[in-house]
Image: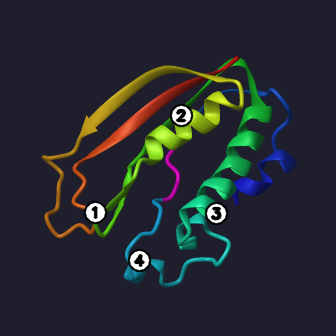
C-alpha cells in the first residue's frame, strides 16, 4: 500500500519515482476482488483526488530535491463527463512545490481496444521535478 511508503523509505532518499495511479471510476466489473482501501474503488472524484494527494505528498517527502516523479495518467470519462486527471494532478503537484518539466502524450491507437469503457486512446506522461 503506497500510503505506508514512509515506513520503508527514508526522507529524501529517492531520485526518481515512476508510477501510474489507478484509474478513477473504472468499470464495475473490474472492481471485483479489489481491496476496499484501493484507490480504484473510490467513485467520488474529489475523494479520489484527496487520497491521491495524500500519497503524492508522501512521495514528495521521500524524493530528493531535484528528484523526478514521472506519472502515466489517463483522463477519466464517465458517461458524457470527462475528468481531466492530468490537469488536476499537475495543478495539485505545483501546489506541493513540484515543477512541471514535461508532458508527453502517449498515443495508444495501435493498442486501442474498441471495447474499452472510456474510449480514450491516449495517456499523458507527466514529468514533475521536486523543487
The residue indicated by pointer 2 is 90
x, y percentage for residue 43?
53, 72
**Which badge, 1 or 4, is on the more N-terminal residue?**
4
The 10 Å Cα crowd at callout 2, few under 14, some 14 to 19, many 20 or more, is some
Q: Closer to us: mark 4 or mark 2?
A: 2
Instruction: Kindly state the secondary structure of the residue where label 3 is placed.
Output: helix
**Which badge, 2 or 1, is on the more N-terminal residue?**
2
> Which residue is at a point 41% across and 81% down the rendered structure image?
28
Between marks 3 and 4, how big is the CA–CA gap?
A: 19 Å
Q: Which residues are magenta?
A: 18-22
> Which residue is at a point 81% across and 40% down the rendered structure image?
9
Quarter location, residue 39: bottom right
Quarter location, residue 49: bottom right
Colouring chosen for the image of the structure: rainbow
The residue indicated by pointer 3 is 47
Between marks 2 and 3, how big is the CA–CA gap?
A: 17 Å
Between marks 3 and 1, how big is the CA–CA gap?
A: 20 Å
Amino acid at each position: 500500500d503506497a500510503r505506508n511508503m514512509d515506513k520503508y523509505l527514508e526522507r529524501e532518499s529517492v531520485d526518481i519515482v515512476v508510477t501510474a495511479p489507478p484509474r478513477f471510476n473504472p468499470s464495475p466489473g473490474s472492481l471485483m476482488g479489489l481491496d476496499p482501501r484501493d484507490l480504484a474503488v473510490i467513485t467520488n472524484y474529489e475523494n479520489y483526488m484527496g487520497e491521491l494527494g495524500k500519497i503524492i505528498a508522501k512521495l514528495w517527502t521521500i524524493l530528493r530535491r531535484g528528484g523526478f516523479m514521472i506519472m502515466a495518467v489517463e483522463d477519466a470519462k464517465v458517461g458524457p463527463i470527462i475528468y481531466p486527471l492530468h490537469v488536476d494532478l499537475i495543478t495539485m503537484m505545483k501546489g506541493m512545490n513540484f515543477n512541471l518539466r514535461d508532458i508527453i502524450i502517449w498515443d495508444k491507437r495501435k493498442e486501442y481496444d474498441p471495447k474499452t469503457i472510456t474510449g480514450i486512446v491516449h495517456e499523458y506522461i507527466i514529468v514533475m521535478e521536486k523543487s
